[in-house]
Image (tube, rainbow, N blue to C red):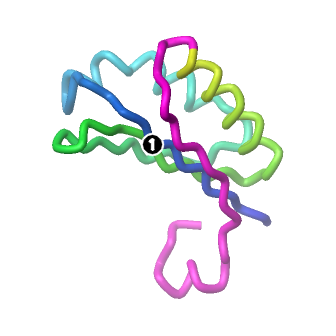
Amino acid sequence: MNHMILVFDFPFDGPWGDEMAAASQGLAEDISTEQGLVWKIWTENRQTKRVGGIHLFNDPDAALRFRDKHLARLKSLGLNDVFAQVYEVNQTLSQITRAPI
């Protein structure tokens, strides 16, 4: 299987922590239904005021579709300066370092 990692990172003024979780619950539920998504890790850095996520997909096309969809969603919310990159997973090395794939 060809796993792909999709990384998002962008500026954000808050809310943070539990408040962010409450405000983003609907978005998280929507993302959880994405075809090909295995998991997502949500990231936040209050000091640099940036948030994002690391997504594992089991289908390269699904990763690209979601990237485009989520970029459009973020842009519609007025979020700019969004970093979005797709990477192939090196299965052999990732298994040595205990990646959950």
Q: Position of residue 93 (x, y in %)?
A: 59, 85
Q: Position of residue 97 (x, y in %)?
A: 47, 83
Residue sitting at x 56%, y 32%? 32
**Highlighted magenta segment, given as a residue range:** 76-101
Judge left or right: residue 87 versus residue 28.
right
Mark 1 residue type:
Asp
Where is the C terminus found, in terms of image quarters?
Answer: bottom right
Residue sitting at x 46%, y 22%? 79
Judge left or right: residue 2 versus residue 46.
right
Q: Secondary structure at mark 1?
A: strand
Residue 48 vertical placement versus 89 (above, below): above
Residue 52 vertical placement versus 93 (above, below): above
Q: Position of residue 95 (x, y in %)?
A: 57, 81
Judge left or right: residue 77 versus residue 72.
left
Where is the N terminus found, in terms of image quarters?
Answer: bottom right
Task: In this rendered view, identify the residue nearer to me: 101 or 10.
Answer: 10
Residue sitting at x 54%, y 49%? 7
Residue indicated by mark 1: 9
Answer whether residue 83 is magenta in the image. yes
Residue sitting at x 52%, y 67%? 100
Residue 78 vertical placement versus 64 (above, below): above
Which of the 4 image quarters holds residue 3? Answer: bottom right
Task: In this rendered view, identify the residue nearer to me: 17 or 32.
Answer: 17
Answer whether residue 93 is magenta in the image. yes
